[in-house]
Image: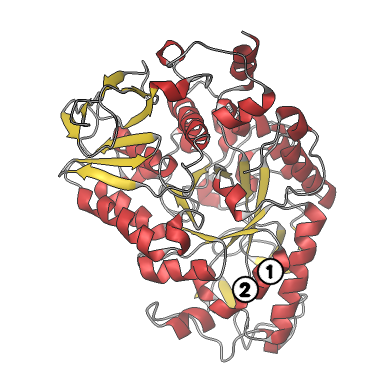
Amino acid sequence: MKTVSLLTALSLVGPSLAATAAEWQSRSIYQLLTDRFAKTTGEGGTCNTEDRRYCGGTWKGIINKLDYIKNMGFDAVWISPIVENIGGDTPYGQAYHGYWTLNINNLNSNYGTADDLKALSSALHAKGMYLMVDIVVNHVAATTTPPTLTYDGYAPFNQATDYHSPFCFIKDYQNQTDVENCSIGDDKVALVDLNTNSDRVKQTFNDWVKKLVQDYSIDGLRIDTVKHVQKDFYPEFVKAAGVFTLGEVLDTRFDYTGDYTNYMDAVFNYPEWYNVLDTFQNSTGNIQRAVDAVSQSAKSYKGGGLLSTSSFSENHDNARLPARIPDPILVKNIITWTFVGDGMPTLYYGQEASYAGAEDPANREALWFTSYSADVSLYKYITKLNAARKLAITNKSFLSTPRKVVSSDAHNIAISKAPLLSVFTNGGQGYSGSYTVTNTGLSSGTTLVDVASDNCDTVNVANDGSVAVTYSNGNPKIYLPSSALTSSGLCGSKAGAAKSAASPSTLRNTGLLGLSVAAALGYILA
């Protein structure tokens, strides 16, 4: 991606950074729910997830806590949908999450004003960060269904012909016609399906998204419920948006999900997520599922998934990992997996604080209960993951070279994506076994440093190119050659050369953005 010095980044206070898919590829994304991340004045207060009500988070609140995100190493923020939602209480609570659209031409005033949203965009750009906004083009929300439903309040989609007819709920998710033309939800809250085959609906959305991106200097869009809209809707829509698009296709099939990358820039790698959960669910998880995920991703996604996927471990639609997998070390292996492979890593707010909410709404906790502490183990660990990835990106081939499985057995898998060598086990907490990684392609005698470990443990590559791994408490390994750590700020004395001064542009390129501001500046001035 384009090199931007720290001082230049601080001056980016207005227009979007107009980032390409290739430039997004080098980013790490932090996903948050606006209502649950931070309040304007920074105060706490109650927020019972079971109530499913607005808790008071705002765009101004996000601005006030951007350093909390940036100091963890993230350089893109994905916020929940910004448009006006249906009001009042429903049998499923209020529309605090932003996905129950009423009017796409108005903002959700619960989050703030147009000026507040513009200020958030400017604040992100001033810190060299990207803004990703969640959008919904598949449906609007209603507490009644056609023919009882009237469309008067759903501007600009206020005509019956703007919706698929006859009205139906999806009954068969293996029937693509049902999936695209029928509605999600139920008669308590129906997500009424828009007729995206209509020229009027298409043009309205194309005009709207172009203006939205321009008005708020948006750098990227996350598109909700992608598979529920016919594929030929997307090319013109994406062109009108003029920015990076990342789609949600919730499905287990690689080929089905991968085909959508021919219609937009990228999709979340849901099929791989399912496989990886299977691998690390417990000590008898199936390692072959992770092996298969690597090969299937390479076959199924545009360009092998290098530019066209985002990896993730949690999001707002699924139970958090600790609610599924009680072993914190297995959870740590899964989180690590998302940072060291192909595609952009995405982290869901609260993972850094070990939040453990189960299915919606329990997984949508307020973050202010943590007091935004950076002095917790996963926050520190995720900071290391981002720093290691940023450092690897300085190797020109990292983003363009597909990851590969170099060796595996019933409990271990090693992934090479030069200069990273990452080794995982499903042994779990307390596991102290060993594993020999073969076929590394590394030169004999090369010193590797585990930059994820507390002590930056080292190991030398054997004469046959193998690496002998000894696990500590089942933790994953992220190895970098010691020579690659020079001037990186990672692992101090374990680096292959003496520390030297770094310019602001070097700061961006070496991964020091993954460290706290204080640590980064301390390193430069030392």
Which mark, by number, is residue 235?
Answer: 2
Q: Residues within 10 Å of mark 2 (few under 14, many from 20)?
A: some
Can residue 70 be seen here? The reply is yes
Q: Nearer the viewer, residue 496 or 258?
A: 496
Name the image quarter holding residue 174. Answer: bottom left
Circles 2 and 1 in contact, beta carbons < 8 Å: yes
> Residue at 61% of width from left, 77% of height from top?
233
Could you tell me residue 283's position as x and y percent?
Answer: 19, 41
Q: Is residue 500 left or right of residue 358?
A: right
Q: Quadrant of residue 150?
A: bottom right
Q: Can I make out residue 182 in this image? A: no
**Disc 2 residue type (three-letter):** Pro
Q: Quadrant of the N terminus?
A: top right
**In x, y percent, where is residue 381?**
44, 27
Residue tagged by mark 1? 239
How crowded pointer 1 is (Cα within 10 Å; few <14, some 14-19, many 20+) is rated as some
The answer to whether 289 appears left or right of 181 in the picture is: left
The span from disc 2 to disc 1 (Cα, nearest Å) is: 6 Å
The quarter of the picture where the C terminus appears is: top right
Q: Residue furthest right?
A: 115
Image point (61%, 62%), residue name? 99
Q: Can you give x and y, in whole percent of width and height, for residue 271 in the image? A: 37, 60
| Residue at (77, 52) in percent of width and height | 217
Residue at image x 25%, y 26%?
444
* Secondary element at image label 1: helix
Pick the front one: 376 or 130: 130
Q: Amino acid at mark 1?
A: Lys
Residue 348 spot, x, y in % from top left: 51, 44
Q: Residue furthest bottom?
A: 166
Disc assigned to residue 455:
none
Locate residue 339 relative to residue 365 in the image: left or right: left
